[in-house]
Amino acid sequence: MQHLNQDGTDAYRFTYYSPAEPSTIHARSISEIPSNGENLSSMLRKGCFWIDVLSPTDAEMKALSKIFHIHPLTAEDITMEEPREKCEVFKNYYFICFRTFDQDQTSVSYLQPVGMYILIMKECILTFHFRPLPHPYHVRKRIKQLKDYINVTPDWICYAILDDITDSFAPLIRAIEFEVDSIDELVLILKESEQSDMLRRIGYCRKRMMGLLRLLVSKADVVKTIVKRGEARAQDGDRPALSNEVALYLGDVQDHIITMLQSLNHYEKISSRSHSNYLAQISIEMTQTNNEINDVLSKLTALGSVLIPMNLVTGLWGMNVQVPGQYQVWIYYTYIF
């Protein structure tokens, strides 16, 4: 995100990257991609390339579909921002829906799901998204650092994108771990006056965990499907084949996703236990308070049982009404009352 703001490339929605080019090309439209007097077709014939598109319009999707022979169902899924994560195999490409999240902490949509749509072809890879994301820049930076040690292919770029999206969940899960451990220790230590915001902390933490679980739960199946379908060789040779090395890398991504899911499920159980312990402690404190109130009320009842008869007698004969013996002449009776 800082790269986008510093370089002023947030207005450029098309990004073209190729190992054959000296630098990444940012453009406002696909027609602005050719540079140095070349046309786009000659640039595409140089070998592996990657076009990243931010918020494509309907007209741009039609043009890209015509150029790269994209199926109408795929174009519809991208345009409608298909929310379900999946991997589909078409005649000449793989179509992958992989969700990340809005990483701008100042945004009102922070941690909200954002779809990343990837098309893996034999000589190129196309990516589409509808919000600015840091993953494409991170992947290009990683390729620049490792270009002397790796063979940049469309399937490797796809792996790098999936790996970067998966790694972006790690800081959030680590923060949740610290928060859960803190809540678990404090819920039985703090006094009643210090626990005013504990229930809010538990609820907010569990809400974040459920949001991350919703984003991670289907990713392992998507990666598994990519590896399984990528190992099947195409009969006509138009569809790209997944290399064995990239399959191993994708297996590592799948392991990371499963580990994160197991960690989140474990933290969810701990927070559920902390929630129960907090409610139990509140119940115990309320019971103790009720017992103290009952002790005070029992003492007041004992005192009232002594004072109420006296108050009744004095009140009865202190009223301005006729009472028994009021008009008797007997001296002893009059003396008493």
Image: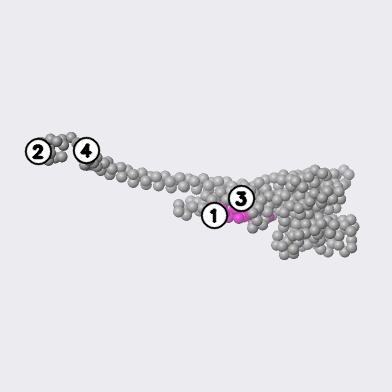
Q: Is label 4 or label 3 in front?
A: 4
| Alpha carbon separation for disc pair 2 and 1 | 83 Å
Q: In the rendering, which numbered label is found on residue 154?
A: none
In percent of width and height, residue 209 lies at 61, 49
Quick check: 209 left or right of 234?
Answer: left
| Alpha carbon separation for disc pair 2 and 4 | 21 Å
Magenta region: 168-181
Among numbered discs 1 and 4, the one appearing first in the sequence: 1
Residue tagged 1: 182
Residue tagged 4: 321
Say which residue appears at 68% left-offset and 54% top-offset: 102
* Amino acid at circle 1: Ser
Q: Nearer the viewer, residue 290 or 233?
A: 290
Q: Is label 2 or label 4 in front?
A: 4
Mark 2 near mark 4, Cβ–Cβ under 8 Å?
no
| Alpha carbon separation for disc pair 1 and 4 | 72 Å
**How many marks on residues?**
4
Q: Main secondary structure of the magenta part?
A: helix
Among numbered discs 1 and 3, the one appearing first in the sequence: 1
* Amino acid at circle 3: Arg
Among numbered discs 2 and 3, the one appearing first in the sequence: 3
Among numbered discs 2 and 4, the one appearing first in the sequence: 4
Residue tagged 2: 331
Q: Nearer the viewer, residue 11 or 198?
A: 11
Q: Residues within 10 Å of mark 4 (few under 14, many from 20)?
A: few
| Alpha carbon separation for disc pair 1 and 3 | 16 Å
* Amino acid at circle 2: Ile
Dot 1 lies on which element?
Answer: helix
Q: Is label 2 or label 1 in front?
A: 2
Q: Is label 1 or label 3 in front?
A: 3
Quick check: 51 left or right of 108?
Answer: right
